Amino acid sequence: MACPLRITSLVMRKPDQPVQRQRMGRVIVTCAQCGATFETIRSQMERRGSKFNNKFHSRECWRAWRVENRQTRLAKLLKQQYRMTQTQYDAMLESQGGACSICGNQPGVGLRRLVVDHDHVMGRVRGLLCHGCNQALGRFNDDPLLLASAIRYLARRSDC
């Protein structure tokens, strides 16, 4: 059985607009950029509010910002997580021939950019991989013995 909504308050925007209902634990905020009003979770507002100077953005404005600042966000991610610059990433991509180190697929239509593969113990960057190869290494816990066992298994089963 679905839990019924509890209305905590009714908020009127303008006389000609319908009444907005506000659910328990939620607040209505106004987008700092476009002026649209939307509902958000109170705990998110309290947690993120001071970080963003109590400025909130609608989903559409947030998506537009992400598209506009994609390269900046990627450069910041590379710097924070892997201590490498965009130039170093590009040089590594060039040295690999613009393709994944394992399967040789190149990023393009339908394939994300290559991800940075790193040693989780030492934190050293090993190379650039496609998303699938990076996940496969993670599933094998970066264990060469486990990967060798998988290769032996595939070799045995492919003769059938």
Image: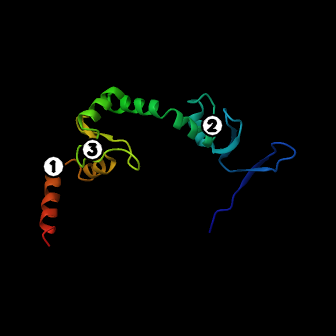
**Quadrant of residue 120 within the rendered picture:** top left
The three-letter amino acid code for the residue at tag 3 is: Cys
**Quadrant of residue 95 within the rendered picture:** top left
The three-letter amino acid code for the residue at tag 1 is: Pro
Q: Viewed as shown, does residue 94 lie left or right of 79?
A: left
Mark 3 or 2, which is nearer the eye?
3
Which badge, 3 or 1, is on the more N-terminal residue? 3
Q: Rate crowding at label 3 as few (under 14), some (14 to 19) or many (20 or more) other CA atoms within 10 Å.
A: many
Instruction: Indicate the quadrant containing the C terminus: top left, top right, bottom left or bottom right.
Output: bottom left
**Image marks 3 and 2: residues in contact by CB distance under 8 Å:** no
**Residue 38 picture location, percent across and down:** 68, 44
Q: Which residue is mark 3?
A: 100
Q: Residue at x 33, y 41 (%)?
A: 115
Mark 3 or 1, which is nearer the eye?
3
Q: Looking at this view, is 1 or 94 the one in front?
A: 94
Q: Viewed as shown, does residue 24 lie left or right of 93?
A: right
Q: Residue at x 30, y 50 (%)?
A: 135
Mark carried by residue 144: 1
**Image marks 3 and 1: residues in contact by CB distance under 8 Å:** no
Q: Rate crowding at label 2 as few (under 14), some (14 to 19) or many (20 or more) other CA atoms within 10 Å.
A: many
Mark 1 and mark 2: span between their CA atoms? Answer: 46 Å
Q: Viewed as shown, does residue 16 lie left or right of 158?
A: right
**Residue 18 picture location, percent across and down:** 82, 50
Q: Rate crowding at label 1 as few (under 14), some (14 to 19) or many (20 or more) other CA atoms within 10 Å.
A: few
The three-letter amino acid code for the residue at tag 2 is: His
Q: Judging from the image, what secondary structure is the residue with disc 1 in?
A: helix
Q: Residue at x 15, y 58 (%)?
A: 151
Q: Which residue is mark 2?
A: 57
Instruction: Indicate the quadrant containing the N terminus: top left, top right, bottom left or bottom right.
Output: bottom right
Q: Judging from the image, what secondary structure is the residue with disc 2 in?
A: loop
Which badge, 3 or 2, is on the more N-terminal residue? 2
